[in-house]
């Protein structure tokens, strides 16, 4: 999680740990729905990239 | 460069997961697996037909499971056993005090209450003895109940429930509610612009500081160091805001506060702790048979 920017972390946590809707997160971050989705996607992408070597080793 | 500008530049640079020809883009896949896809129907139809995208989706699901597991590590959990430990400690203190008070009463100079039959006293004395004999334990019990009631809004009563069972507690919910209020203030501060409306934070922060102290002390009593540490950090920032003269909330002060909140990742920590409290409450509620309050 440390490799995410504060905005990415916030969006990711609000969506997937607090279960807030995209619209609610948009209100918190003052961003459009699309921007929130992009932020969450970017967060997931970074985490996936970081996890890729671990996932490969685990197979 | 601000986060948002940097992220926009990054979006432009790396793109948002362009689709391989004839397949779903990475963004479409990720958002669809997370339930946030813009074009769910299109994605669902494509996934039914395309083996390659099905494989990508399966791989992605595995990674998302990893992410869900790993991202929940290191979260300061709100310990559901905390309330039980606090209650046990308070209960033994109260019982000790009750015993001490009773002993003190019995050592007072004057006639000791003795059974009326042995003393051969009149009806008034009998009633007096009866009153003392009956009312003293009742008064002590009432005092214990009253104190327990006051503690009750903070602490769950373990009466009628196994000691090892962590139920959804009032404390957990009130800590969660406090974290909710705190994160709203922090988020507004982080996203705030210097104007006169910022003065409203002073009163709100002062209220939160008072609540925060209660929860922090409860956490300390229960030796829940992670929660205590988080509430300690939160309290320092809230104090800074609460003690600020209204006129002092200028751009430089606000920028300093924002930097302080962001440098310690305070908002993130509060949000994660809040989510942890939620999970604990929901998890405990699921594990517990429905019973009445208290």
Image (cartoon, coloured by chain):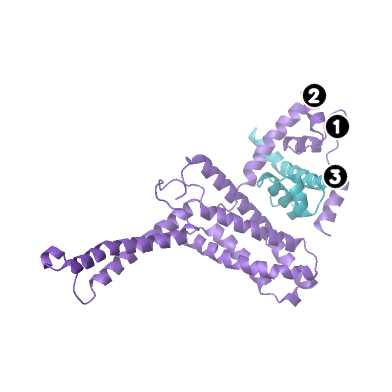
Chain colours: A cyan, B purple
Residue on which disc 3 sits: B14
- Residue extending farthest to the front is B123
Q: Nearer the viewer, mark 2 or mark 3?
A: 2
A22 relative to B125 in the view: left or right? right
Secondary structure beneath label 1: loop
Q: Do labels 3 and 1 share a chain?
A: yes
Chain of the residue under label 1: B
How much space separates mark 1 and mark 2, taking CA atoms?
12 Å
Q: Nearer the viewer, mark 1 or mark 2?
A: 2
Residue at 11 percent across and 65 percent down: it is B118
Chain of the residue under label 2: B
Q: Is residue B205 above or below residue B64?
A: below
Chain of the residue under label 3: B
How much space separates mark 3 and mark 1, taking CA atoms?
15 Å
Secondary structure beneath label 3: helix
Residue on which disc 1 sits: B20
- The 10 Å Cα crowd at callout 1, few under 14, some 14 to 19, many 20 or more, is few
Numbered tag placed on residue B50 in the rendering: 2
Q: In which quarter of the image is residue B215?
A: bottom right
């Amino acid at each position: 999680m440390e490799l995410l920017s504060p905005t990415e972390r916030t969006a990711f946590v609000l969506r997937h740990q607090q279960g807030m809707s995209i619209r609610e997160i948009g209100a918190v971050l003052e961003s459009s729905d699309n921007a929130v989705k992009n932020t969450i996607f970017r967060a997931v992408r970074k985490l996936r990239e970081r996890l890729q070597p671990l996932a490969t080793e685990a197979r | 460069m601000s986060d948002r500008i940097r992220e926009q530049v990054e979006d432009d640079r790396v793109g948002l997961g362009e689709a391989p020809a004839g397949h779903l883009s990475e963004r479409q896949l990720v958002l669809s697996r997370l339930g946030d896809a813009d074009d769910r129907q299109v994605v669902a139809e494509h996934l039914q037909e395309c083996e390659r995208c099905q494989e990508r989706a399966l791989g992605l699901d595995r990674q998302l499971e990893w992410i869900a597991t790993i991202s929940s590590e290191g979260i300061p959990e709100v310990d559901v056993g905390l309330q039980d430990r606090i209650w046990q400690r308070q209960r033994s203190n109260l019982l000790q005090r009750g015993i001490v008070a009773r002993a003190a009463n019995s050592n007072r100079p004057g006639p000791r209450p003795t059974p009326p039959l042995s003393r051969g006293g009149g009806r008034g004395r009998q009633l007096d003895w009866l009153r003392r004999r009956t009312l003293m334990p009742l008064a002590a019990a009432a005092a214990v109940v009253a104190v327990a009631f006051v503690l009750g809004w903070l602490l769950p009563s373990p009466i009628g429930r196994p000691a090892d069972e962590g139920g959804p507690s009032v404390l957990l919910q009130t800590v969660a509610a406090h974290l909710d209020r705190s994160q709203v203030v922090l988020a507004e501060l982080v996203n705030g612009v210097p104007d006169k409306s910022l003065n409203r934070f002073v009163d709100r922060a002062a209220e939160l500081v008072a609540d925060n102290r209660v929860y922090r002390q409860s956490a300390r009593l229960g030796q829940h160091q992670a929660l205590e540490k988080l509430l300690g950090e939160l309290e320092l920032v809230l104090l800074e805001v609460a003690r600020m003269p209204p006129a002092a909330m200028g751009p430089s002060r606000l920028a300093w506060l924002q930097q302080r909140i962001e440098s310690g990742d305070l908002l993130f920590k509060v949000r994660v702790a809040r989510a942890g409290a939620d999970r604990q409450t929901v998890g405990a509620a699921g594990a517990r048979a429905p019973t009445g309050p208290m």
